[in-house]
Image (cartoon, helix red, strand yellow):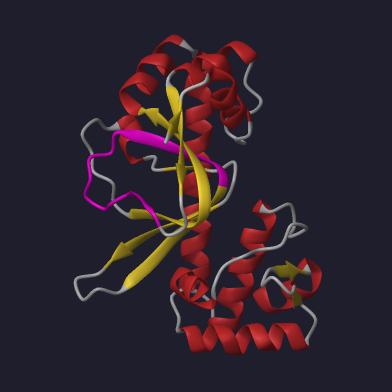
Amino acid sequence: MAVHTVPQALSAISSTSAFGDLPLASREALAGISSLRRYRKDAYVFIEGDEAEFLCLLYDGAVRTFRTSLVGAEQTLQLVRPGDLFALTGVLRPRDAYPATAQTVEDSWIGFLRNEALRALAQRSPDVAWALVQVFGERVREQSRQMLDLTSRDASSKIAATLLRLAEREEEGRGGLHFTHRELAQLVGCSRETVTRVLREFREDRCVEQTVDGKLIIHPQRLQSYAG
């Protein structure tokens, strides 16, 4: 169910790292072209190949984006956390298609900003335009770093580097990281069995701890020895 009230949309906009520091007038303008929707766990937000009509922001919950190969194998591209923007494809290029599928990992609130309206707002507002430039720049840096991690490391090093990168986004892991071994395996490009073995090794070396509800608490200084 969509929620169109400006206060709730404004709260969602203000929660993002991309837009949270904008002047109030700019955030209110963004809220005016956005809507919020509630999704249950395992719901599809959009499907690979759909027309990319919206920029999405995660207000609460968790989402993963993934691509599916011709033989049906899934490759996780991004684990989206509250405050993150995703589905950037159609912002700059009208009528583009989503290159991946987005699915909720848990019950989630997701904000939608229609790309056509967002482009028009960016033309009127330098603050919004500059915020979008920074979003794309950060995404390029993150993808470059992820590609380097995945192509130049062994399994233990890749998993350690990925956990450290995710922990940075979770304020150095204080809130804990929550995902399945399968999701982490898809993200780093190795088997679930390998992830299970490596995480067991990390726990034995006290690089990570696992809480009773399945979250991983990261100890960055200890884990850095594996990441190299």
Residue 23: where, in percent of width, then height?
64, 15
Picture residue at 80% right of the left edge, 69% below the top = 221
Residue 185, relative to residue 79: is it above or below? below
Q: Is 226 contained in the magenta span?
A: no
Residue 178: where, in percent of width, then height?
62, 65
Residue 228 makes an appearance in the image: no
Residue 122, relative to residue 189: is it above or below? above
Picture residue at 60% right of the left edge, 35% below the top = 16
Q: Which residues are magenta?
A: 43-60
> 215 or 1, which lies in front?
1
Q: Is residue 31 left or right of residue 201?
A: left
Residue 74: where, in percent of width, then height?
34, 70
Picture residue at 78% right of the left edge, 58% below the top = 174
Total labels: the figure holds 0
Residue 26 makes an appearance in the image: yes
Q: Is residue 142 left or right of residue 24?
A: left
Picture residue at 31% right of the left edge, 36% below the top = 90
Residue 155: where, in percent of width, then height?
54, 82
Quadrant that contains the C terminus? bottom right
Res 210 quadrant in image: bottom right
Which residue in the rendered view is the most extreme toward the front?
Answer: 1
Residue 218, relative to residue 171: is it above or below? below
